[in-house]
Image (cartoon, rainbow, N blue to C red):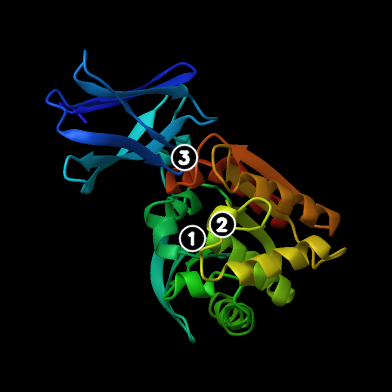
């Protein structure tokens, strides 16, 4: 935001500034997945200003919503504010192991991208939102640097909000058609399923419906909506279906337990329902490792939590 203002982290405080010396704007608001807040106009400075307590995060992705004099709105951003204690993961810069990418046609789903290491392996990790998990979440590079050989299957998605909202039809498609096709093509056994947000919810839902296909789960910031925590999401058209699934999870005393790693941003709305889901799953026999990472509901936050949490899960599921 050079020339228009800026944002910076001052220890325990975040500060935002948007220059407007002629007061052409009638309002400025910070929008992020961690919080939303209005800036106040300071005529003596000719700028909009906000000073607020820093949430439990090391970096913040945000936009500025500008309200103009005629009532219209526009946005500036996205922007990133990095606090002094933030550092990118080391694995982003280490040499990647050799491997090849290819395409795999999947019935009823489309074409997945598969990354395979040079070393022979019968292990596979299958990820929802595959293209974004790879491009924005760094999953492909992580797979090539972790030191644990496995095939990475990046699944396509056509109707995300429908398929990934505890849809029984999609769970059956994934568990009964897609995973057997993947295992046959790669010579693999039961897979580790991975997902973020709705994709994490859908992977857990599929594991409950077709447990025989899964050896483990890696779930980041799952959208495990519950009425007591998530009323702000009640306008989502598949709210009822998700709430019914999470209700069944809360009521179950046992489950088809596999090793699980869960991460969630310490500054995001989904934290309470993720804590609850981790507790429900432990009570049902799942060995759950749960971690809160200092970020919000963002791809960079999910990327930064891959190590050590996914690394540890890989070694739990595939110890040799």
Q: Which residue is mark 1?
A: 117
Q: Which residue is mark 2?
A: 149
User: How far is mark 3 from mark 1, CA to CA?
Assistant: 17 Å
Q: Which residue is mark 3?
A: 91
Q: Which mark is residue 173?
A: none
Which mark sits nearer the N-terminus, 3 or 1? 3
Callout 2: SS: loop
Which mark sits nearer the N-terminus, 1 or 2? 1
Circles 2 and 3, Cβ within 8 Å, touching? The answer is no
Callout 1: SS: strand
Choose top left, top right, bottom left or bottom right for residue 19.
Answer: top left
Choose top left, top right, bottom left or bottom right for residue 79.
Answer: top left
How packed is label 3: few (under 14 Cα within 10 Å), some, or many (20 or more)?
some
User: How far is mark 1 from mark 2, CA to CA?
Assistant: 6 Å
How packed is label 1: few (under 14 Cα within 10 Å), some, or many (20 or more)?
some
Q: Position of residue 42 (x, y in %)?
A: 26, 19
Observer-side mark, 3 or 1, equals 3
Residue drawn 35% across the image and 22% down it: 8
Asked whether residue 89 is in view, the answer is yes
Asked whether residue 150 is in view, the answer is no
Callout 3: SS: helix
Front residue (pair 11, 17): 17
How packed is label 2: few (under 14 Cα within 10 Å), some, or many (20 or more)?
many
Which mark sits nearer the N-terminus, 2 or 3? 3
Q: Quadrant of the N terminus?
A: top left
Q: Is residue 287 left or right of residue 12?
A: right
Residue 213 position (above or below residue 76) = below
Give the residue furthest to the front.
Answer: 70
Q: Position of residue 259 (x, y in %)?
A: 74, 56
């Amino acid at each position: 935001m050079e020339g228009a203002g800026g944002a910076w982290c001052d220890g325990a405080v975040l500060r935002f500034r948007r220059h407007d010396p002629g007061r052409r704007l009638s309002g400025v608001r910070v929008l992020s997945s961690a919080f939303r807040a209005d800036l106040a106009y300071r005529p003596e400075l000719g700028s909009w200003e906000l000073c607020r307590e820093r949430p439990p995060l090391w970096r913040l992705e945000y936009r500025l919503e500008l309200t103009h004099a005629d009532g219209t709105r526009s946005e500036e951003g996205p922007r990133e504010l990095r606090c002094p204690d933030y550092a990118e993961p080391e694995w982003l810069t280490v040499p990647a192991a050799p491997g090849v990418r290819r395409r795999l046609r999947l019935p009823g789903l489309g074409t997945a991208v598969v990354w395979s290491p040079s070393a022979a392996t019968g292990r596979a990790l299958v990820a929802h939102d595959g293209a974004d998990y790879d491009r924005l979440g760094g999953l492909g590079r992580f797979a090539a640097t972790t030191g644990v050989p496995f095939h990475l299957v990046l699944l396509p998605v056509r109707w995300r909000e429908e398929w990934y909202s505890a849809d029984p039809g999609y769970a059956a498609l994934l568990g009964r058609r897609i995973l057997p096709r993947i295992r046959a093509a790669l010579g693999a056994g039961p897979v580790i399923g991975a997902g973020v947000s709705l994709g994490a919810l859908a992977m857990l839902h599929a594991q409950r419906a077709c447990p025989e296909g899964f050896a483990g789960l890696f779930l980041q910031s799952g959208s495990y909506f519950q009425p007591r925590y998530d009323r702000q999401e009640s306008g989502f058209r598949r709210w009822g279906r998700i709430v019914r699934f999470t209700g069944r999870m809360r009521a179950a005393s046992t489950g088809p337990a596999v090793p699980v790693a869960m991460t969630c941003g310490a500054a995001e709305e989904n934290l309470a329902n993720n804590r609850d889901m981790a507790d429900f799953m432990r009570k049902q026999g799942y060995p759950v490792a749960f971690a809160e990472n200092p970020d919000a509901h963002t791809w960079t936050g999910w990327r930064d939590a891959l190590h050590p949490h996914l690394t540890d899960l890989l070694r739990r599921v595939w110890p040799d």
